[in-house]
Amino acid sequence: MTDIPARSPASAYLQDGRGIVARSGTGLCWRSGTWTPADAVPGCDGELLPPIANPIAPPLVTAPPAPAAPVPVAPVPCDFSYTLAGDGAFASGQASLNAAARARLDRELMPRLAECGKIAAILVTGHTDRLGKRAANQALSERRAAAVADYLKASGVTAPIERRGAGSSAEVQTCSARQPSAKLRQCLAPNRRVVIEVRGTSK
């Protein structure tokens, strides 16, 4: 048991003849009746030694910051519209694709479809001019849309294809009827068409 010297000249602890604070068998210092906290001495009521770091305590480890969540990248649309002119695609009043039309689709449309990473839908709409009966024009526009859709599928396009006929309801060129029939038919040529609308995302 370590000896604790009493303060001199006066001490609020009992002490022996050597000036050492008297302690119990368990090491507690015996105080006198006049003891106050101001009389505390190291080893009895004060700290015997200044605090030191616990040598067996594990070092404080700071967790690394959590990695930032990746910012989602919005897909880039691969949307476009392609028009196949009727006079360069079908014979007058017919719905079968001619060789020139098939070559145009292979040369102009198919490479653009290949640039898309994913194609969600393709809408093929056939149109006619206003000449002829409305019911006949409606049926002709549907057959022309079907011919283009079938050719795309036969060329390996696997995306969903919707076909639709608009008849003569969506003209893009208006022409005066007061002209010879040949010139009128030539003027109305832009209305005889098939429009292919593609919706998808880029690679």
Image (cartoon, rainbow, N blue to C red):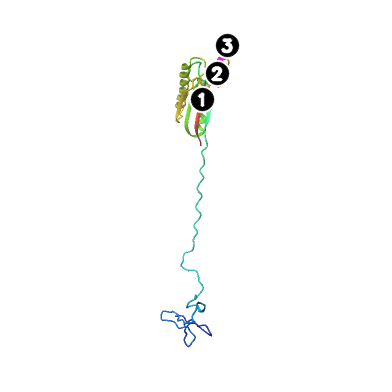
Q: Nearer the viewer, residue 16 or 12?
A: 12
Q: Which residue is mark 1?
A: 195
Disc 2 secondary structure class: helix
Q: Quadrant of the N terminus?
A: bottom left
Range of residues picked out in magenta: 182-190
Tell me whether circle 2 and circle 1 mark residues in contact (CB < 8 Å): no
Residue 13: where, in percent of width, then height? 48, 82
Q: Amino acid at mark 2?
A: Ala
> Quick one: 111 or 180, which is closer to the camera?
180
Give the residue pinned by disc 2. 189
User: Which element is circle 3 on?
Assistant: loop
**Comparing labels 3 and 2, the label whose residue is closer to the camera:** 3
Q: As shown in the figure, which amino acid type bears the numbered disc 3?
A: Pro
**Spatial distance from mark 3 to mark 1, Cα to Cα?**
28 Å
- The answer to whether residue 177 is left or right of residue 141 is right
Q: CA distance from mark 3 to mark 2?
A: 14 Å
- Crowdedness near tag 3: few (<14), some (14–19) or many (≥20) residues, C-alpha within 10 Å: few
Element under disc 1: strand
| Nearer to the camera, 107 or 113 | 113
> Which numbered dot is residue 180?
3
In the displayed orientation, state which residue is furthest to the bottom: 17
User: Vertical placement of 41 versus 161: above or below?
Assistant: below
Please tell me which of labels 3 and 2 falls first in the chain: 3
Q: Position of residue 79 (x, y in %)?
A: 52, 32
Residue that protrudes farthest toward the left in the picture: 25
Location of residue 74 in the rendering, given as x and y in whole percent from the top left corner: 51, 40
Would you say residue 17 sits in the magenta stretch?
A: no
